[in-house]
Image: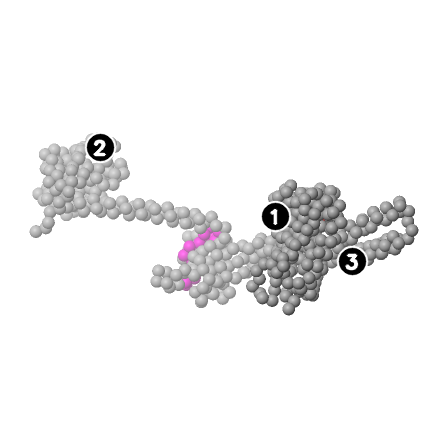
Amino acid sequence: MKKQVRILSVLLRVLMIDDSEKDAELVLANLSDAGYRVEASLADNARDLKMLLQEGSWDIALCDYAMPTFNPFDVLTLLKEYKVDIPFIVITGAIGEENVISLMKAGCHDCVMKNNLMRLPEVISRELAEARTRKENKELRESLQVSNDNWVNTFDAISDIISVVSSDYVFLAINRAGAESIGLPKEQIIGKKCFQYVHHTLGPVPECPCTCALATGENAENECRMGDRMFLLQAWPIKDVHGNFSSFVHVVKDITDSKNAEKEIIRAKEAAERANAAKSQFLANMSHELRTPMNGFMGMMQLLEMTPLTEEQEEFLRVSRESSNLLLAVINDILDYSKIEAGMMKFEEVPLSIRKVLEDSAALFRLASTKKRVKLGTFVENSIPGQLVGDPFRLRQILSNLIGNAVKYTFEGQIDVSVRMMEEPNPGKVRLEFTVKDTGIGIPTEKLEDIFKNFSQADNSNTRKYGGTGLGLAISKELVKMMAGDIRVESVLGVGSSFHFICVFGRAD
Ligand code: ADP
């Protein structure tokens, strides 16, 4: 015997449509016996039913088949009208098969015979489960529709031409830009062979990236010109769940503007490089041309110094000599910088003494520092070998520039120039750190990076106040780089600055 459904206290809101209260109670008692906690409302005419449909909500509708003024078809029409989608079960005496079929066609879910009400709990349980599934499916369909709409809208919003093409070249999907480029509505394109519409040929075109992607199963792309526009054509193969190549995404991107911009950038870069090389060449030539007459002045001034002069003439000569020295320094800076820029700076590899180079560099500024009552001290760590190999002239140039700046920008206190050994993995090399520390005016934090750029000064009034071109540190930085090192500065405004640079030298032995 079939097992009876036993429901454990589940609330069931029943919409009863019956003209006999007694019959209705019998039905409901049957449900209570099966374990439902039943809440029911009864109607036997359209007016009452409409009122109930407006006011309440139900899990199930149970409808008597034979009523004097109402029938299940009218009830079904009203349920539809009020958009009430719940299982609808007709309780009936003997009705013919044809009537049952008409009821089912009208939307009834099942018919239960009055003399077999024991079946009702089982039918209700099954119909509620099916109603739940129907509801879930409906929600699933709706969310699928939303995500499909989102996908299509996104696809259509892209200005590149995008299509999905099957492995036998049939359009499966195409975006708005694609349909516009072909000049037909999407519906007329989908399902057609792509080569007919894109290339106007009877078969696939060998140079099309789709043909290439099909043959290799790999992404493919190429560029092509159509009229005065350039296009990038790409094809990405798509694999199905079994890993087989099923279709590909084909993208056509108009790259005319970016190609033109790219060409323009290359042209501008080449023009800038040519201009820069011409400028460097010009500066190198000019500096050379200027140095020759400068040497003439200076030689003549030296000769003039040896002749008998009045006190006034001696003063004129002193000022002329100082001015010439300054001018020569500027010309030398410009010449060096243009040599570096033009890649023409040469380095020597000769024996050198660090102590001597340091002392010689400091000696150039002793007189100036003594005049300012600023102490200028030097210190070389004992462990530093007496002889090394490198370019003494370039090292002196860096040190002179840093010491010269320290003297220029310090008005009290002292300047310390020191050298220490650093670790160096290569046994044939020596790595040294040079420090030039002063108690001068300092450099604002926001200028610390800029001062190493060419023609850059911490304060724009520097040239007027202290002279200089703003090239010394830029040259030093490049020279240090060429000696496999680096330069950095620490400074506190009003307290002083410390310039550190590292250079690598060869061992002499
Ligand atoms: P300049 O010929 O102007 O001295 P540099 O390239 O040697 O050019 O220096 C760039 C700028 O860095 C200087 O104008 C100055 O503002 C700042 N500077 C360099 N050294 C010092 C220092 N020891 N103390 C303070 N400011 C400094």
Q: Residue at x 45, y 67 (%)?
A: 215
From mark 1 to mark 2, how far is it between C-alphas? 86 Å
10 Å crowding of disc 1: few (<14), some (14-19), many (20+): some
Say if mark 3 contacts mark 2, CB within 8 Å.
Answer: no
For the record, the magenta segment spans 166-179
Kindly identify the amino acid type of the residue bearing the numbered disc 2: Leu
- Mark nearer the viewer, 1 or 3: 1
Which residue is nearer to you in this view: 23 or 476? 476
Question: Residue 493 location, x and y as percent?
Answer: 63, 42
Which residue is nearer to you in this view: 307 or 101? 307
Q: Residue at x 75, y 55 (%)?
A: 332
- Secondary structure under tag 3 reads helix
Residue 432: numbered disc: none
Question: Residue 66 location, x and y as percent?
Answer: 13, 38
10 Å crowding of disc 2: few (<14), some (14-19), many (20+): some
Residue 104 vertical position relative to residue 272 in the rendered view, above or below: above
Q: Which residue is mark 2?
A: 52
Q: How is the image coloured?
A: one colour
Q: Relative to residue 75, is residue 401 drawn left or right? A: right
- Secondary structure under tag 1 reads strand
Kindly identify the amino acid type of the residue bearing the numbered disc 3: His
Q: Quadrant of the C terminus?
A: bottom right
Question: Residue 209 location, x and y as percent?
Answer: 49, 63
Residue 288: numbered disc: 3
From mark 3 to mark 2, how far is it between C-alphas? 107 Å
Residue 490: numbered disc: 1
- Mark nearer the viewer, 3 or 2: 3
Count the marks: how many?
3
Nearest to N terminus: mark 3 or mark 2: 2
Say if mark 1 contacts mark 3, CB within 8 Å.
Answer: no
Say if mark 1 contacts mark 2, CB within 8 Å.
Answer: no
